[in-house]
Amino acid sequence: MRRKSRRKSIILISATAVAAAVALAAATAVTYVGATAVAVNNNVHRSDVLKDMKTLPAAVPKLGQDTNILIMGLDTRVDEKGKPLPPEMYDALHAGDENIGGYNSNVLMLIHIPADGSKAAGISIPRDDYVQVDGIPGSGPFKAKIKEAYGYGFAAEKTSLINAGKPDDDTTYQAARDAGRKAEIATVTKFLGSVHIDHFLEVTMAAFYETAQAIAPITVCVNKATQDTFSGADFKAGMQQINAKQAMAFVRQRRDTSDPTYLFSDLDRERRQQAFIVSVSHQLKDAGTFTDIGKMQGVLDAVSKNIVVDSELNLIQLAQQATSLTGGNISFSTLPITGFGTSPDGASINTVDINQVQATVKELLTPVPPAPAPTTTATATAAATPPAAAAASAAPTSGGAAPAAPSAPASNVYADSTGALQGGAIPCVK
């Protein structure tokens, strides 16, 4: 039976986008840190849920060699054993203590890495999309926010085990966490259109903070000065370097409390998370951090202590795939919604068109190759001449040849959450 939705917290948390940045960027560092990388690969916390799900009759088959990695960021304020965090970390998180939050997957992102080396895709799934929840044994179909599938699966399994006489200990807790992962993965898989998930990475707020500490200072860019008392955000306009506490605020901000006309939404926060991944990936490579053995050992140590991955994910093999991504060979998009609404139990939700969502996913995962360039001389000449240069050459001049038109750099400023955000340089976002 579906249990009632949890009381909505005053502070709505987006847990962490650093999972993708660390998984893809820091994994590249294994080529530089040798034995440390092997230790990380062996010591990281692992879960068998994907292996178990592949044996189910309803399992989605793998049809190609591309790799799909699901990033799940939880809003829980406890450690991997369900215990409270140190008081100083709660202060840094600016998000309340262990009594606030739960097991919502407030960050959901699919990273698609093509086997042929073509551009990868990062697909953000808005956390409040109202969808059918799957993967919870003993429960009939019901609808909820997509982020809540994890919490429903966790609660159902923990209740079932305790009712069966199992002790409320770490074994029961870890089994409940696995049930939450299964429910979230099953729900996301169906929502995206039966997309095969090869691997997953799960991080908590503590994981974000400690990993950001290892990476900081981190360079980010915002279009306009902004403040938010809920997340602790306080950023000036333009490029700036931030510490781990500010990084948490950067990926959590969804409002401006200093300017009521500067409107934010959860979709803008999705864009912030994408920008953070791009910024960290670019910064680690551009600054030569991958060759700083001491610093990368700190990053990898933070990764190994704080993330959960599936039992079949090999970080060393991932490094081989991730190398090109840190060079910018990836773009990020957010799945479309049709609007904002209210669920039957009064919760704020995103309304979605399932056919539109699945068509978007199909297009992003299997993009149509560009049409071949025209071969006629006239067309080829025109195509090779930038519009600005063509206009300059056609303009009359008072003497001699027309001046050469300057080359305009690719835009790296994003005013809203729509369109694709490109990797390769630090982006400026809302």
Image (cartoon, rainbow, N blue to C red):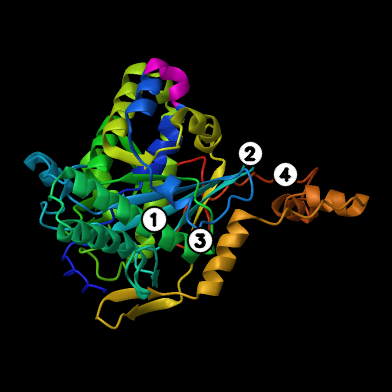
The crowd level at tag 2 (other Cα within 10 Å; few <14, some 14-19, many 20+) is few
The mark that comes first in sequence, 2 or 4, is 2
Mark 2 residue type: Gly
**Measured Cα–Cα span from mark 2 to mark 4:** 39 Å
User: Is mark 1 in CB contact (under 8 Å) with mark 2?
Assistant: no
The crowd level at tag 1 (other Cα within 10 Å; few <14, some 14-19, many 20+) is many
Residue 388, how many percent across, how many down?
Answer: 70, 53
Residue at screen point 27% across, 54% down: 252
Which residue is the site of mark 1?
Answer: 108
For residue 133, above or below residue 346? above
Splitting the image into 4 quarters, where does residue 400 fall?
Answer: top right
Q: Which one is closest to the eye, mark 2 or mark 4?
A: 2
Mark 3 residue type: Ala
**Measured Cα–Cα span from mark 4 to mark 1:** 50 Å
User: Is mark 1 in CB contact (under 8 Å) with mark 3?
Assistant: no
Q: Looking at the rendering, in which quadrant would you find the C terminus?
A: bottom left
**Measured Cα–Cα span from mark 1 to mark 3:** 22 Å
Which residue is the site of mark 3?
Answer: 58
Inspect this view and state whether residue 254 appears.
no
Q: Which one is closest to the eye, mark 2 or mark 3?
A: 3
The mark that comes first in sequence, 1 or 3, is 3
Secondary element under disc 3, as helix, strand or loop, is loop
Left or right of 235 in this view: 332: right
The mark that comes first in sequence, 2 or 3, is 3
Q: Which mark is residue 430?
A: none
**Measured Cα–Cα span from mark 1 to mark 2:** 24 Å
The mark that comes first in sequence, 1 or 2, is 1
Which of 190 and 48 lies nearest the eye of the viewer? 48
Left or right of 295 in this view: 90: left
Residue 147, how many percent across, how many down?
Answer: 33, 62
